[in-house]
Image (cartoon, helix red, strand yellow):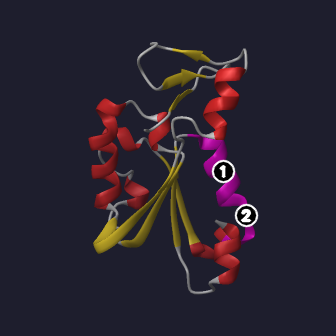
Amino acid sequence: LFPLLRAMPALTVYALDLSATAVGIVRSHPLAEAGRVVAAVGDLTEGSLPPELSGCAADVATLMFVLSAIAPSKFGAALRAVRSGLRPGGAVLLRDYGAGDGACARMEAGREAKRLDASAPWLVRQDGTRAYFFS
């Protein structure tokens, strides 16, 4: 986020996270304090963006390891929320876990992760968070 802001002086960023701590860290950065970042706490699975982000019309939305933390039954609501923040013709860039990738192999090999269902691509980390591995 911040390297992009430094490289692109005209860029404005809208940021969303479930964690108030993460949003606080972003908001306290000098580039955010300069008004180039609008950050909010929110849950994409509710199907809409929080008030701080309503009305934004972004060219690009990035979802970095977001969908893997959401139950598949809530993907539709999450993507509707993302779409509501994009301008017409805007793009969504995804980066997430894949079945058999290095992160999956490390989690399966470790004692801290467990599989919720032998036939499902879900793993639960030691801290209780879930990771979905796409195929």
Residue positioned 39% across, 50% down in the render: 50
Check disc 2 and report its element: helix, strand or loop.
loop
What segment is highlighted magenta in the picture? 19-31
From the image, which quarter does the N terminus lie in?
A: bottom right
Chief SS of the magenta region: helix
From where the camera sits, is residue 108 visible? Answer: yes
From where the camera sits, is residue 33 visible? Answer: no
Going by the image, does 69 lie left or right of 33?
left
The residue at the far front in this view is 100
From the image, which quarter does the C terminus lie in?
A: top left
- List x then y, in percent, for residue 40: 51, 53
Identified by mark 1, the residue type is Gly
- List x then y, in percent, for residue 84: 29, 59
| Label at residue 97 | none
Circles 2 and 1: CB distance less than 8 Å?
A: no
> Please, is residue 106 above or below residue 65 in the view?
above
Identified by mark 2, the residue type is His
> Please, is residue 114 above or below residue 43 in the view?
above
- Residue highlighted by disc 2: 29
Residue positioned 70% across, 72% down in the render: 3
Q: For the residue carrying disc 1, how many other residues have a C-alpha within 10 Å: few (<14), some (14-19), or many (20+)?
A: few
Q: For the residue carrying disc 2, how many other residues have a C-alpha within 10 Å: few (<14), some (14-19), or many (20+)?
A: few
Question: Which is nearer the eye, 67 or 87?
Answer: 67
Q: Marks 2 and 1, how far apart in space? A: 9 Å
Question: Which is nearer the eye, 59 or 91?
Answer: 91
Residue positioned 65% across, 30% down in the render: 105
- List x then y, in percent, for residue 106: 70, 30
- Residue highlighted by disc 1: 24
The image quarter containing residue 67 is top left
Going by the image, does 132 lie left or right of 81?
right
Is 20 part of what is drawn in magenta?
Answer: yes
> Please, is residue 59 above or below residue 73 in the view?
below
